[in-house]
Image: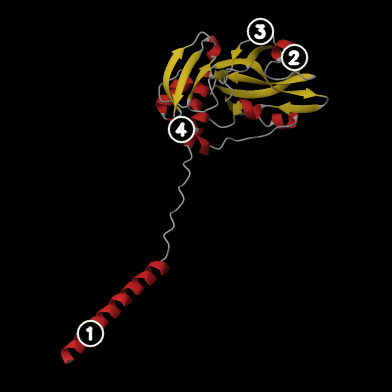
Amino acid sequence: MENGKKAVFAASVVLVLAVGVRVGLIYRERNAPVAVKAPAREVIADDDLVFLKQKRPSSMADIKDLFGTTLWVSAGGQLEYYPLAGKTVQYGKSAGTLLGAQELKVKRAVEQVAPKAATFRIPGGDRQVLLVFTLAGDAKEYGVPVGYRQAGQYTFYTDEIFFYDDPHELYKHWGPEVWKAVDSHQVILGMNERMVELSLGQVSKSTSKDYGNRMVVFANMGKPQAVTFVKNKATAVRADQGY
């Protein structure tokens, strides 16, 4: 009889212990700190981390701040520049078109009435404002439209036309091979849209608005180039006479 009571007692103890352990485990699970997964950090492309200086000029006094400085062309393939005769810009004698990353030294600025043919990119207003500059290795002075005056008010586009800092340093992470292609205005596979745009110019048309995943045909100074981008890398380049 005593043995039976002991067995019942032992079984009860085991049951109580088992229940206690289970309750303890449940309590620990319910009160354990919840592991919160850290949100994925947004990956920002190196190009988008580059700080592009803006000057926002609104007067001729602001433009004078550029005199004696070096600028580099951002809006490649868009603006014609002209020789000077004395202090007058010769609109009828185009000296060429400014190319991406081209370096120029600013001398001064002039205001001049522009013919209609010279107002395709920069409005003529009452008078057009042109920067007078020299190119590396060329002592001749040239003028390029950068703004206009209308009813006494000035509008300038220097922030859109130029880099105020050397793009070779701003985009140093592109590496020497890419910069060699950009400076020679060529395309190599693997370049992204920004690189190709600086190399071949901003005048272009594309097959879609999906930046980095489309085909873009660059006018390239009358020698159109069709560049296909996949995941923002050039995967194919060909001449395109249908531009």
- To which quarter of the image does residue 120 belong? top right
- State the separation of the CA atoms marked 2 and 3: 13 Å
Nearer to us in this view, 164 or 30: 30
First-in-chain label (1 vs 4): 1
Q: Which amino acid does label 4 sit on?
A: Lys
- To which quarter of the image does residue 121 belong? top right
- State the separation of the CA atoms marked 4 and 3: 36 Å
* Number of numbered discs overlaid on the protein picture: 4
* Residue lying furthest bottom: 2
Residue 172: give its label: 4
Q: What element carries label 2?
A: loop
Q: How crowded is mark 2: few (under 14 residues within 10 Å), some or many (20 or more)?
A: many
First-in-chain label (1 vs 3): 1
Q: How crowded is mark 1: few (under 14 residues within 10 Å), some or many (20 or more)?
A: few
Query: Mark 3 — residue?
Result: 93
First-in-chain label (4 vs 2): 2
Q: What residue type is labelled 3?
A: Lys
